[in-house]
Amino acid sequence: MRKTRLFPFVAIALLLFGCSKKPLQQDNVPGDKTTTGGGVAADTSSPNDVVGKVTVGYQGWFSALGDGSPNNNWGHTNLEMWPDTREYTRIYTGVPFGQGGVAQPPYTGNLGNGQPAGMFSSYDQSTVNTHFRWMQEYGIDCAALQRFANEISPGSPIKGQRDGMATRVMNAAQTYGRKFYIMYDASGWGNLTAIQNDWTNTIINTLHLTSSPAYAKQNGKPVVCVYGLGYAQHPASPGDALKFINWLKDQGLYVIGSVPGEWRRGFGDARSDFGDVWPAFNMISAWAVGRVVDPSYEQWVSGDLAYCNAHNMDYQPCAYPGTAFSNSNGGVRNGFKRNHGDFMWSQFAVMKKAGAVSVYIAMFDELNEATSIFKCAEDASMIPAGKYFLTLDADGVHVSSDFYLRETGDGGKLFKGQIPYTATCPTPFTVQ
C-alpha cells in the first residue's frame, strides 16, 4: 500500500469540533494572504496552479478483469470503502476483496439494495472523466497523479498501465479545465536515476505531458512532486537526495517535497540528517495521514509554515478525511473516524488560521485506506450485501455520497478567502 505511514501521535485523543448545525463564526474574514491569529502570510509565491489552490492526490490504480488495460486483471481490490457507482458508464463484476484481513473469492452478488455489485476500472477513460467532472463541479483545482518509482522500468506491463493512466488523466484534465501534475512515489526505492530517466524518456519525450495546457505550472515552471525522500526507510543519502532535487530543478521544474510529518524535528520515521536537503525544495508538504488534531497540531502547522517562510519556500499542508484499513490487515475498524466531516474541517480551520493558502488532500480515490473524498457508499444499502465496508454513516450521521467533495469545495473557499473563517464545518450533510 502506498503511504501507509501513520503519524507518530496516534495515541492522543482527537479534539473534535461541531459541524454544520451551528452558525458560522465570524471571527475574521481572512484574505488570501492574511491570518486570523496574527501569523505570517503563508506562501512566498503568488497564486497560480498550485499555490493558492486545492490539490488532491489521485491514485488511478484500480484495474479490473476485462477492462482492456495492460494489466487486464483485478488490481488494488483490497478495499476498505465501496464506491458509489451510480454515475459510472461501466462497472465490472466479480471483484475479489478482503474482509478483516482475509482474502475473499470474486464477488458476483448484489448490494444491500438488491442492485448488482460492481467496481469501476481507473483505466476506462469514462471513469477518469467522471472523476475530473466531479473535480470541476466541486471546485477542486488540481490533481497530483501518483506514479510509482518501482513500476516504471521500461517494458514492464505495469509501466504501460501507469503510462496509459497518465494519458487518460491529461485528457480528462483538458476536458474539464482542471490542472494535474506527476507525483513520484519513491518510498523504499533507492534508484533515483530511474525517475530521472522516466521523466526524460517517458513524461517529456513520449507522453509529452508538460506540453498539455492542463499540466500544472507554478512560477512559470512545470510542477513535479516527490514523495519518500527523508523517510528513515528510504536508502537515499542526503547528498544523493540533494543532487536529485537539483537535477529536477535544472530541468526547469518547480519541485514539491512530500515529506515525513516530523521532517523538521527528525524523529519518528523522519531522518535527522536531512537538514540541508529540505531548503532545496520549492514547496514542502508534510504527510499527515494518521496525525490527530490534538493540542500540538496548530504548533506543528505553524512551525512548518514559519520554516518555509524563513527559507523562501512555499507551504502546502496535507489534510485527510479519516483513515482505516481493517479489510487489508484485520485491524480495528474505523480507526481514525471522519465524524461526518468534523475531523477534516478541524484541520482546515487550523491551517487557515495559521496562514496557509494552499492545501493537499489525501486522497481523492483512495478506497484501500479509506482516505477517499470522492463519492462512496452512504450506508449498508450501497455495499455488497452481508459484507463489511466503512460507510459514510459509520459515525451516526447520514451524509450524502458527495459530502466530502462538497466539504472539500467549502475548504477551498475558506483557503481562498471566499467565505468567512469558521472553526465549524459549514457543509450541509445532504443537499435537497
Image (cartoon, helix red, strand yellow):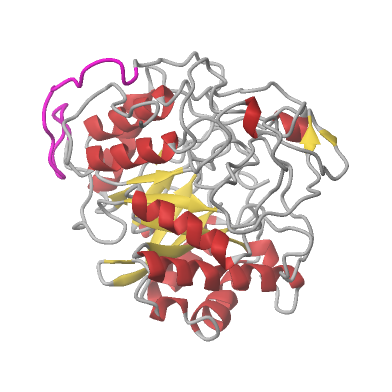
**Residue in the picture at 52% in, 30% down:** 322
Residue drawn at point x = 24 percent, y = 41 percent: 413
Residue 428 picture location, percent across and down = 34, 27
Q: Nearer the viewer, residue 430 or 342?
A: 430
Which residue of the protein is positioned furthest toward the bottom in this rendering?
A: 205
- Placement of the C terminus among the 4 image quadrants: top left
Q: Position of residue 82 (x, y in %)?
A: 64, 38
What residue sits 56% from the left and 59% below the top?
127
Q: Is residue 27 visible?
A: yes
Vertical side of 216 occupied by 202: above or below: below
Question: 57 left or right of 302?
Answer: right
Q: Is residue 302 left or right of residue 215?
A: left
* Residue 318, x across and y down, in percent: 41, 41
Q: Quadrant of residue 366?
A: top right
Nearer to me, 191 or 77 = 77
Visible in this render: residue 243? no
Left or right of 349: which side holds 418? left
> Which stretch did the figure color magenta?
19-39
Residue 32 belongs to magenta span? yes
Magenta-colored segment: predominant secondary structure: loop
Residue 125 position (above or below residue 87) = below
Using the image as rendered, state which of residue 131 and residue 49 is in the foreground: 131
Q: Nearer the viewer, residue 303 or 150?
A: 150
In this figure, what is the number of numbered marks? Answer: 0
Residue 283 in percent (x, y) is at: 35, 54
Q: Is residue 307 above or below residue 113?
A: below
Please check the rendered image and state whether residue 322 is part of the magenta-colored stretch, yes or no: no
Residue farthest along the right direction in this orientation: 105
